[in-house]
Amino acid sequence: DTMTHIQPRPCQLTSPMPSGRYKPFVPHKLPDRTWPDKTLGDAPRWLSTDLRDGNQALVDPMTPARKMRMFELLVGMGYKEIEIGFPSASQTDFDFVRQVIESGIVPDDVTISVLTQ
């Protein structure tokens, strides 16, 4: 069979956070301040920085294969925003960032970012 199989673009399934099970805190009334009275109505957005080991892990940095497994795990866990690396820190980080961008593995509802200086 010489047909080429095209992998469908991954799409992350929605999995809402169970924020309804948590009671909001009772705000503190401080008349000279505005922020203590503020409360959150929705679950926060989470940004994973787990793939940015760059120059912070010179002794034992993640390999591109390990970073890819971690990326797939983060997507599977439901992260919508993932910082995928620090490309100016090392050739490994640069190559991984290029691989993620060029491979098309980022689901449409996931935003990726990189650390820059």
Image (tube, rainbow, N blue to C red):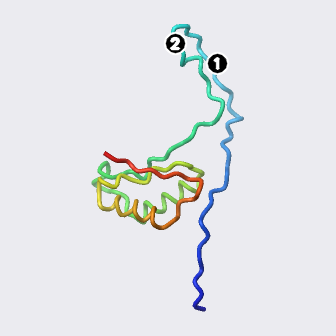
Between residue 61 and residue 84, name the one nearer to us.
84
Closer to viewer: mark 1 or mark 2: 2
Q: Is residue 57 above or below residue 43?
A: below
Could you say whether the residue bearing mark 1 is in a helix, strand or loop? Answer: loop
Circle 2 residue: 33
Find the distance from the CA under tag 1 to the CA under tag 2.
Answer: 16 Å
Residue 37 image point, x, y percent: 59, 17
Is 115 on the left-hand or right-hand side of 10?
left
Amino acid at dot 1: Val
**Pointer 1 or 2: first along the chain:** 1
In the picture as drawn, the residue positioned furthest to the top comes out as: 31
Is 103 on the left-hand or right-hand side of 57?
right
Residue 51 image point, x, y percent: 42, 53
Please identify the quarter of the rendering in which residue 46 is found: top right
In the picture as drawn, the residue positioned furthest to the bottom comes out as: 1
Give the residue at x 34% y 55%.
87
The quadrant in which the N terminus is found is bottom right
Amino acid at dot 2: Arg
